[in-house]
Image: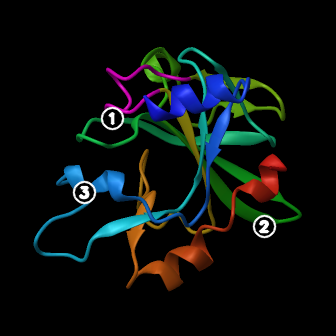
């Protein structure tokens, strides 16, 4: 696979894919593209490509808002969304492509401290048929979503999503 070869070639532990990248990989999934809507191919998070079972830590104190196993082809698979509050401003972070064990005993309202492990990465069989990686996204207004939120949008919807989903590298210091 391209990502694994790239990591190996550069003697790295992690590779990352960027915010607002246009990606053709979503064309193969009806979950992202139907004849009734414009193509969704603009990535709204950051992907960190590394091995399955890699521990995932929260960059901030947070509380579990929701979680779900999103099983559509090309979807997140197991996903956790945390609520954060900084100086009275609430927002959310989404962690997608996790292991099933990450959500098996999880409870809404569980608190995590900055730097605490919240999950592990899943393998290809549970994370939407992708090589192991974390999809990390910031969301200002979660709307009515629970355990899921669009991680890819169309060009027509980019203005809204760019405003609602700021660049997550701000928290990751990439």
Figure quadrant of the N terminus: top left
Q: Residue at x 69, y 64 (%)?
A: 167
| Earlier-in-chain disc, 2 versus 3 | 3
Mark 2 element type: strand
Query: Mark 2 or 3, which is nearer the eye?
Result: 3
Cα distance, mark 2 to mark 3?
Answer: 36 Å
Q: Residue at x 37, y 23 (%)?
A: 124
The Cα–Cα distance between marks 3 and 1, rounded to whole angstroms, is: 14 Å
Residue corresponding to mark 2: 89
Label 2 and label 1: CA atoms lie apart by 32 Å
**Helix, strand or loop at mark 3:** helix
Contact between marks 2 and 1 (CB within 8 A): the answer is no
Residue 89 seen from this side = yes
Q: Quarter-wise, where is residue 111 in the image?
A: top right
Who comes first in sequence, dot 2 or dot 1?
Answer: 2
Q: Of 75 and 64, which appears nearest the observer?
A: 75
Q: Is residue 74 magenta?
A: no
**Which callout, 3 or 1, points at the residue further toward the start of the chain?**
3
Residue furthest out toward the left? 35
Image position of 2 (left or right of 88): left
Q: Classify residue 3 as left or right of residue 18.
A: left
Residue 97 on image: x %, y %: 46, 33
Which residue lies under the disc numbered 3?
27
The disc at residue 128 is 1
Magenta-colored span: 121-131
Mark 2, Cα crowd under 10 Å, few <14 / some 14-19 / many 20+, is few
């Amino acid at each position: 696979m391209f990502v694994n070869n790239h990591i190996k070639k550069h003697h790295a532990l992690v590779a990352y894919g960027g915010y607002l990248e246009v990606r053709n990989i979503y064309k193969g999934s009806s979950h992202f593209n139907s004849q009734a809507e414009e193509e969704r191919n603009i990535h709204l998070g950051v992907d960190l490509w590394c091995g399955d079972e890699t521990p995932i830590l929260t960059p901030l104190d947070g509380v579990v808002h929701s979680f779900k196993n999103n099983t559509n082809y090309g979807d997140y698979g197991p996903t956790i969304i945390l609520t954060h509050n900084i100086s009275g401003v609430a927002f959310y972070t989404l962690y997608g492509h996790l292991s099933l064990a990450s959500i098996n005993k999880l409870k809404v309202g569980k608190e995590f401290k900055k730097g605490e492990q919240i999950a592990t990465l899943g393998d290809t069989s549970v994370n939407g048929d992708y090589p192991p990686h974390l999809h990390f996204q910031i969301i200002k207004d979660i709307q009515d979503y629970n355990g899921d939120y669009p991680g890819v949008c169309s060009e027509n919807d980019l203005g809204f999503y760019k405003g609602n989903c700021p660049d997550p590298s701000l928290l990751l210091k990439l």
